[in-house]
Image (cartoon, helix red, strand yellow):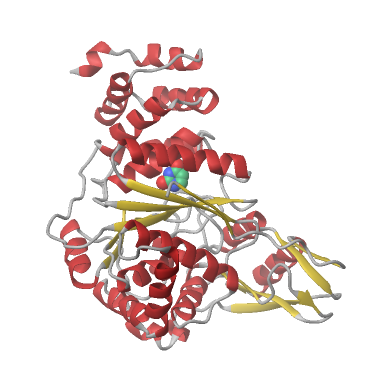
Amino acid sequence: MMLRRVNPYELILRKRNRGRLAPEEIRALVEGFGSGAVPDYQMSAFLMAVYFRGMNVEETVALTEALMNSGERFEFPDLAGPKVDKHSTGGVGDKVSLILAPLAAACGLIVPMVSGRSLGHTGGTLDKLESISGFRTDLSRAEFERILGNIGVSMMGQTDGLCPADRRMYALRDVTATVDSIPLIAASIMSKKLAEGIDGLVLDVKTGGGAFMSRLPQARSLARQMLRIGARMGKRVVAVITGMSEPLGHAVGNALEVAEAIEALKGRWPLDLEEVTLALGEEMLLLGRVARTQVQARRLLLRALADGRALEVFRKLVEAQGGDPKVIDDPSRLPRAGHVHEVFAPAGGYLRQIDALRIGLLGVELGAGRRKLGAKVDPAVGFVFRRKVGDKVEPGELLFEVHAATRRRAEEAGRAAFAACTIGRNAPRAGERVIARMGR
Ligand code: URA
């Protein structure tokens, strides 16, 4: 087959020397990786060459297609209605999917969401959902489709069959320092999302200290690459660039974020979480053509929240996927940490910074994320920030809580998290939450 005509060594050498690869060469390389003909060490060397030399649009599109075609593709011809998903490039305290997926479904979209687990210092939607007792994310394709048909939304993990080459390539990137490469991230994300059988996709591209693309020009460039891939593949895609310099909302940690998402679905949410969720929701409704203008989209979203429909969809989703729906009326049924430690402001002033990267890493230390592939997370641990950046704080006022398995760990994390916060005399410049919309 194709592979007999390509020599992985030659492709690595050409990329290393700044050369270009033809789409069929990239396809053959990925096929060879899938069949075992291209060993991990050659793929790792190729990834490092791409990390340093980059890829042009043709190469990135070819890589996306090859990854997407490495396994099965979902298609839902029997589901009537616009199928629109959203994907975040990863953040700290980012529980938007838990709120937005049921909210968008309540507004008439079908939301087939294939989500991931925590990655590095960033959280994962699957880990959050699984903090609800009994909630299953390992659905079969048939279950996924049935739930989508019944309630308009389902959230599951990547099956073995969906983009298997991406899964293996991702594991190599994770251990060879080649994650933060724009073409590799773009192809990895877009291959999985395009294999989901959607009509449209809204990308939440995060920027700031807690994001993989910390600088705005890099985030814009990643967004542009993903928009180009979408356009080449005939899918409607828009990108929203959002700020990730402080954690989003109040809570960081799996069950704590589910509790915050439930509050949000009841209409009680902090401004940053509301702004980001509604901006992404507007774009979803516009892509799905259930709204014609941004103003109309926002009105539909607010109505579905105010009349309780979004919360009801979430309740049905939890029930349909085997979870305990009683958590919605009684979030105290979610896992609770052994110890809660409160940290108070030693002096007054303005809260000028909560360093999202450091808080994300401390969350991993507490057990909310993974230090090793396949490790178990502790659903109960994390942080709840009672003050946000820009707030005035009085001496002795509660800044945040640490939820940890033991008192010692809670106190240690409390000291380290306090060092990640800055209190100053002057109010900080207001940080932008929704920075740009691209691709409309
Ligand atoms: N999420 C993905 O799925 N892939 C990446 O490369 C980065 C984030």
Q: Residue at x 39, y 68 (%)?
A: 129
Total tally of numbered discs in the picture: 0
The picture places residue 359, in percent across and down from the top left corner, at 64, 60
> Where is ligand 1, by quadrant?
top left
Q: Quadrant of the N terminus?
A: top left
Asked if residue 113 can be seen in this view, the reply is no
Q: Where 234 falls versus 75 (above or below)?
A: above
Residue most toward the left? 78
User: Is 409 displayed left or right of 43 in the figure?
Assistant: right
Taking the view exactly as shown, the residue that stands out farthest to the bottom is 329
Which quadrant of the view contains residue 233?
top left
Residue shown at 45% from the left, 58% from the top: 124
Question: Relative to 415, does residue 53 appear above or below in the rendering?
Answer: above
Residue 328 point in image, percent of width and height: 39, 83
Q: Closest to the observer: 385 or 409? A: 385
Q: Is residue 178 above or below residue 311?
A: above
The spot of residue 178 in percent (x, y) is: 51, 34
Residue 109: x, y in percent?
A: 28, 65
Left or right of residue 434: residue 152: left
**Residue at image coords 64%, 54%:** 357
In the image, what residue occupies the spot 44% across and 12% down? Answer: 14
Q: Nearer the viewer, residue 283 or 33?
A: 283
Residue 331 visible in rendering: yes
Q: Which quadrant of the view contains residue 184?
A: top left
